[in-house]
Amino acid sequence: MKVFKEQFALNNYLKTKTVDSIGLVPTMGALHFGHLTLVEKAMNENNCVIVSIFVNPTQFDDISDLNAYPKTLEEDLQKLAPYGDKILVYAPDVRDVYPGTATSSNRYTFGLLETTMEGKKRAGHFQGVATIVHKLLAGFNPTRAYFGEKDYQQLCIIHQLVAQEQLPVTIVSCPIIREKDGLAMSSRNRRLNQKERSQAPLVYATLKKSIALKTSSSLEEINHIVTSTFEQNPAFKLDYFCIADARSLQPITTIKPDQTARAFIAVKLGDVRLIDNVNF
């Protein structure tokens, strides 16, 4: 494993190697087993893998959230070290990604994809996500880039980004990896205290319950039941629950026979915001 702080140094290194395909795994660090499954899939499908570790400031709408985001580079490198020389790590400082004094997002047009759910709740978030992903894809020209479905709306945005910018990369979506109790693996989970961690599985349990209700309840009734579930559990603050078309991400009131839907949820538990989603 080699670690690079600068993009040009990593690209110069690549020029000395015979590389048929590059897999890119963009991360913000605080790596967990879910990240490592992306790395392993990338390794199986490419002969070189770049793992980026960068907490991107432009996708945070709340400076306190940015400051609280776990930064564990040394621990992350220890987790990647066993994968050997096939792994190249790009762990830049902010100025390598955003040269000069300005740290700002590019402007993209994603239409309704970014006006619902996370986009509605977190102003500018997806402009920041698209900016950093665009920089990484254009900077390293990977053959494939790997993203988890926990951030499903982000995944849809990235697909649209690649199409709009005509980037020559295949976006590989990877299933959500869960803890044994169902909690979706996330870097933010390490910020939960012991009591909150014991409560957190309610999020996935509620999503599973919503699926079980499909045959006996309307979508409006399911929305009401989910809302009531969190009203009865005051440790949580429900940000949104939404049953939406899996492609447009727009909320639906009924599911058509040829339609694929997903259920999305976001809650605050203490100071930690948790998101999850399932096929519905």
Image: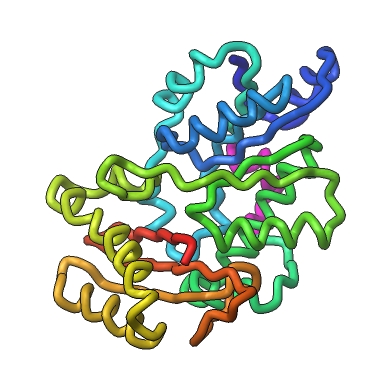
Q: Position of residue 174 (x, y in %)?
A: 56, 44
The residue shown at (74%, 62%) is 160
Viewer-proximal residue among 83 and 98: 83
Which coloring applies here? rainbow
Q: Where is residue 153 in the image (x, y as percent from the top left)?
A: 57, 63
Looking at the image, residue 51 sits to the left or right of residue 109; the answer is left
Q: What's drawn in magenta, residue-wise?
A: 92-104
Q: Position of residue 239 (x, y in %)?
A: 35, 74
Give the prevailing secondary structure in the magenta stretch. Answer: loop
Question: Up-down: is 119 above or below 187?
Answer: below
Number of on-image labels: 0
Residue 61 shows in this picture = yes
The residue shown at (35%, 59%) is 274
Residue 240 shows in this picture = no
Residue 56 part of the magenta segment: no
The residue shown at (27%, 80%) is 225
Looking at the image, residue 101 sits to the left or right of residue 187; the answer is right
Residue 227 position by quadrant: bottom left
Split into 4 quadrants, where in the image is the N terminus?
top right
Question: Up-down: is 3 above or below 210?
Answer: above
The residue shown at (20%, 49%) is 197
Residue 268 position by quadrant: bottom left
Viewer-proximal residue among 66 and 270: 270
Residue 164 position by quadrant: bottom right
Q: Position of residue 7 (x, y in %)?
A: 72, 32
